[in-house]
Image (spheres, rainbow, N blue to C red):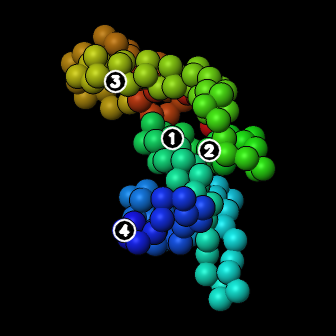
Amino acid sequence: MPDDVPWDHDELTVGELAARSGVPVSALHFYERQGLVTSRRTAGNQRRFRRETLRRVAFIRVSQRVGIPLAEIGAALATLPGDRTPTAKDWRRISRAWQADLDARIDQLERLRDHLTDCIGCGCLSLRKCGLSNPHDALRATGSGPRTLLVEGPQ
């Protein structure tokens, strides 16, 4: 952000928001089209974002990094108050709602790490171990893909 922007500056331009958040302008425009962030337009039709949008963008980036779909991120952000800056309590409430999903993702990653060299139930039956782990491709009845490592979660 430019040094000439005062610290008590309540609104950011899209360029300032991009610089402060580390998110490209094109991504901010996308987030806005998806309803994840909002801006107001000046008389010259320029976007102005409230300063607390920085927190929303950080939340979006971190949530995406752990694999939360944008639709879920949007639903969570929709529960935040629009008339005030979200508090730590607001953010805790959202993170608690995702706890079970994140725990399931961690479990799946640990299984992947620990058993990647084992038969993963893909149906190839090309490894000698597959004949023992998945005789006659019995896992086929449970669905497609890497059945012994894939943990189906809410989509």
Q: Amino acid at mark 3?
A: Leu
Residue 3 is marked as 4
Residue 42 seen in the figure: yes
- What is the C-alpha distance between the residues marked 2 and 4? 32 Å
Residue 79, percent from left and from top: 75, 41
Quadrant for the N terminus in the image:
bottom left
The disc, 3 or 4, on the residue closer to the chain's N-terminal end is: 4
Labelled pair 3, 1 in contact (Cβ < 8 Å): no
Left or right: 70 in relation to 18:
right
Decide which of tag 3 and tag 1 comes sooner along the chain. 1
- Are the residues tagged 2 and 3 within 8 Å (C-beta)? no
Q: Which residue is mark 2?
A: 73
Q: Which residue is mark 1?
A: 63
In the current view of this chain or complex, which residue is farthest to the top?
Answer: 132
- The residue at which mark 3 appears reads as 112
Residue 87 drawn at (x, y percent) = 65, 35
Residue type pointed to by label 2: Ile
